[in-house]
Image (tube, rainbow, N blue to C red):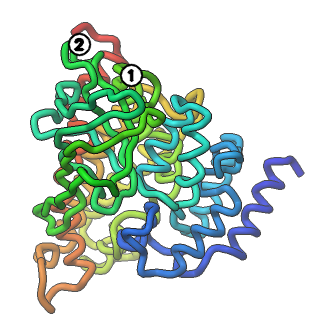
Amino acid sequence: MSALSEFRSDTRAWLGENCPASIRSPAVEDEMVSGGSKHRSPNPDSYVWLDRMHEKGWTVPNWPKEYGGADLTMDEYVVLLEELAAINARTPLTGMGVMMIGPTLLEYGTDDQKARHLPKIASGEIRWCQGYSEPGSGSDLASLQTRAVDKGDHFVINGQKIWTSGANFADWIFCLTRTEPQAPKHEGISFLLFTMDQPGVETRPIRLISGSSPFCETFFDDAIAKKEDLIFEKNRGWTVAKRLLQHERSGIHSLAEAATAKVRTIKGMSLPQAAVHYVGVNDGKIADPDLRDSVLNQQMNSRAFNLTQSRTVQESEGGTPGAATSIFKFYGADLRKDQLELQLKVRGSQSLGWEGDAFSDEEQELTRNWLGSKAGSIAGGSNEVQLNIVAKRVLGLPD
């Protein structure tokens, strides 16, 4: 038996013994663990699973052991993902810590910064949020105006961020600030880390059309960032910021998302299950042939997208591709919207329920997910921005 086959056998046995039954099911948003203590999963098994996976180093399997990972090779990590998917196991820990700032610190952080922050991310002790967009700086992010004034051993920060996902639950923020107002806009930005639980930091949740409030306005009034939490170099934060966005769009953690995507569609029925339930079957097939073709095409597109994403990440040196991640962001946003539009079509008028006994919890959840998905082609960089990046950085087209 090869070493990789032995690893697969041991992994399968361990998961079979240690993954709680309630975790072997499609993810429920409120039960997902993103770190910290301000938002807790109502399912105790979420934390049983987190603790067991953390002990193995499998919340961040490819990170070095000294920072809470397992130092798995890419082949071993793929095996782990395959075995998790085989039992429909949920990701034990998600959020901006493991997906965004953690991988970025592994590349750009000092030894001290890694030692202080990464183990707390791996264990789920700390939850992070992202301070990028501002009311006047969205697609043109480099025009941001939040100021950080150097006071020797610390920075004093004043300004406002918007669309700050989960800021009201976060313990720390990674934040883009302007530290040299007279410099060209891309060259006067610094990347700072600081705590959210300090005087001078205020968050206000934004209620969306879907009824949820995943985003916040965030205000800084003489907030403090220690000099030791300046990442990379002063006035060179744009370099770090761009790399972090690549981790967000298709980092190594996204490989886990792709590998187990078949069990994380939306809360409730998968697309084929819904089609059978609402439309019925004929000779073992979805009764409506046009709908059957649409469902099949959507499933094939999703599978092809996941395989392409996984292959690209595996082939990329360091685990996270570069500018090609914008292809995934662009295509993934539209794929998600197409999936939810098809979910609505399957259910007919039952897909438009907001409240009341005439609609199940699953149907009401679908309505909210459908409305929320409209932001997918804007959040995290609009589709137009992604296409510009692809044109310039992937295809090499002139400006």
Residue drawn at 40 percent across, 75 percent down? 284
Residue 234: which disc? Answer: 1
- Looking at the image, residue 86 sits to the left or right of residue 155; the answer is right
Residue 275 in percent (x, y) is at 29, 72
Residue 261 in percent (x, y) is at 45, 57
Residue drawn at 14 percent across, 59 percent down? 206
Q: In which quarter of the image is residue 351?
A: bottom left
Is any atom of residue 249 visible in this view?
no
- Looking at the image, residue 33 sits to the left or right of residue 281; the answer is right
For residue 283, above or below residue 137: below
Neighbor class of circle 1 (other Cα within 10 Å; few <14, some 14-19, many 20+) is some
Q: Quadrant of residue 180?
A: top left
Residue drawn at 19 percent across, 59 percent down? 372
Q: Is mark 1 on a helix, strand or loop?
A: loop
Residue drawn at 70 percent across, 60 percent down? 56
Residue 40: which disc? Answer: none
Residue 280 in percent (x, y) is at 29, 79
Q: Which residue lies furthest to the bottom in this view?
A: 357
Residue at the disc numbered 2 = 183
Closer to the camera in the image, 181 or 8:
181
Residue 166 in percent (x, y) is at 30, 58
Q: Which residue lies furthest to the front in this view?
A: 152
Tell me the amino acid under the disc marked 1: Lys
Q: Which residue lies furthest to the right in this view?
A: 1
Q: What element carries label 2?
A: loop
Is any atom of residue 142 visible in this view?
yes
Tell me the amino acid under the disc marked 2: Ala
For residue 360, above or below residue 63: below
**CA gap, disc 1 to disc 2?**
12 Å
For residue 169, above or below residue 100: below
- Looking at the image, residue 274 sits to the left or right of residue 112; the answer is left
- Looking at the image, residue 246 sits to the left or right of residue 358; the answer is right
